[in-house]
Image: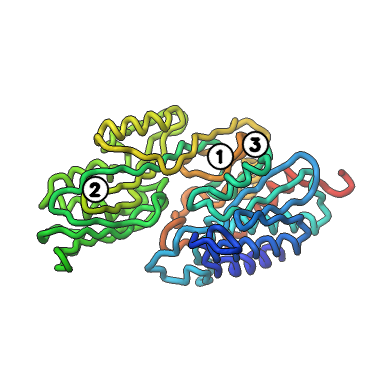
Amino acid sequence: MCFEKALNSIMDFLAIESVQSAPCPSSPFGKGVGEVLDKFASLAKSMGFTVHNEGGYYVTADIGSGKPFAILGHLDTVPLGEGWDHSPLGEIAGGTVYGRGILDDKGPLLLCLYAAAQLVSEGYVPCRRIRFFAGGNEESGWKCAERYSQLDKWPDEGFSPDADFPVIACEKGVLHVRLTLPLPGRVLSIRGGGRVNVVMDTCRAVCDTPVHAKDVTCVPCDGGYAVTAHGRPAHGSTPWLGDNAARKVLSALGEISPAAGELSKALCAIDGSGINCALSDKESGALTCNLGVLSSDENNLYAELDVRYPVTFTAEEIVRRIGGKLSCPVEITGEHLPHSVDVDSPLVRGLLGAYNDVTGRADAPLTVGGATYARVAPGLVAFGPCFPGDEPTIHQRNERADIASLRKIYDIYLLALKRLCFKKREMC
């Protein structure tokens, strides 16, 4: 019954467009974010949690006593985007839930909250002080987590339900950089993308002469010719799953401006080879690079890259390599250091055991390029909600999850919390 209640709540939360917008009295991250945080606070309080709303930055919900255990998720989302087959604000069709945030991260966070509430209702007692952290700025800068770090200490153990199963024990370093480059000749302006951590799905340039290339449209416009391309969005940590519109536009412009063609090769190589960063290591695999945002003024082109680098390298080395290769200023606009936890720790073993027992699998811990809240403290890991082999839809059109999969996710979180944080009343 608790799962059905959770599903109903998830639909209510999906209906709130919680994309960062202009600050307002309820939240520094905009009206929608403030509304969804208030809703989470009200729900958790009704379940018996002790709740604190930190001025619209984040909400904490605590239950139990003992050694702290964290469950960290976020309720803000990337922009809804266009071209959905079902409502991005929540719709059930054919046994599938569609909506921005169903997987990233409203759905998983609420499943964890309801799982904890179910255990309490069944007579289990939390023998850890479980702290839920619901952030309001994970997708746009982590200011919510920074605020918490200024005011409180993160628990030494816990998980973030904001990535993949079975359990992620290692996350690559994340570096967001802004490059200032000369605007290629014959190109008057260029613009594309909205978030550096999303593969660009639309790009438009204006040039002084027509181009005739596939994958783009070219039509007369005020002041020149508009060259437009469309692609397919994907998460910036998995750029191979998308189709970057900037690559098509820059390549097409290469017909009239060799410099634009060279930029396509440099900026759109997802392995980092174009910026002298085709790096890898045994511990965490290969570097990835996503060109997320392009803009320009009269003289310059500005390119924003999302680089996910192996754990044995440093951000300083990446910046040095990019600047040396392209001979341009490189500004760091965002950064997360690499993060790893011992795969033999009780936390990893406990979470992995719950996942394998529910699914009947025998999977091992993962390394990924995604950045999760697990990075805020040394002993945290990412745990779900996406299953191996599932079609990835996070940050894409038609973000979705089958109800049967959501039920299984719920059962995994229920068993993991039961084993790690609860005991029967008579045993406490």
Disc 3 crowd, CA 10 A, few/some/many (<14, 14-19, 20+): some
Disc 2 target residue: 300
| Amino acid type, mark 2 | Asn
Mark identifier at residue 154: none
- Residue 207 showing in the rendered view: yes
Q: Earlier in the sequence, mark 1 or mark 3?
A: 3
Residue 181 in the image: state x and y as whole percent: 25, 43
- Residue 400 showing in the rendered view: no
The residue drawn where x is 44% and y is 61% is 79
| Amino acid type, mark 3 | Arg
Q: Secondary structure at mark 1?
A: helix
Disc 1 crowd, CA 10 A, few/some/many (<14, 14-19, 20+): many
Disc 1 target residue: 375
Q: Secondary structure at mark 2?
A: strand
In the figure, is residue 281 to the left or right of 5?
left
In the figure, is residue 396 to the left or right of 413?
left
The residue drawn where x is 62% and y is 48% is 72
The residue drawn where x is 47% and y is 71% is 87
- Which marked residue is nearer to the observer: mark 1 or mark 2? 2
Disc 3 target residue: 349
Residue 351 in the image: state x and y as whole percent: 64, 42
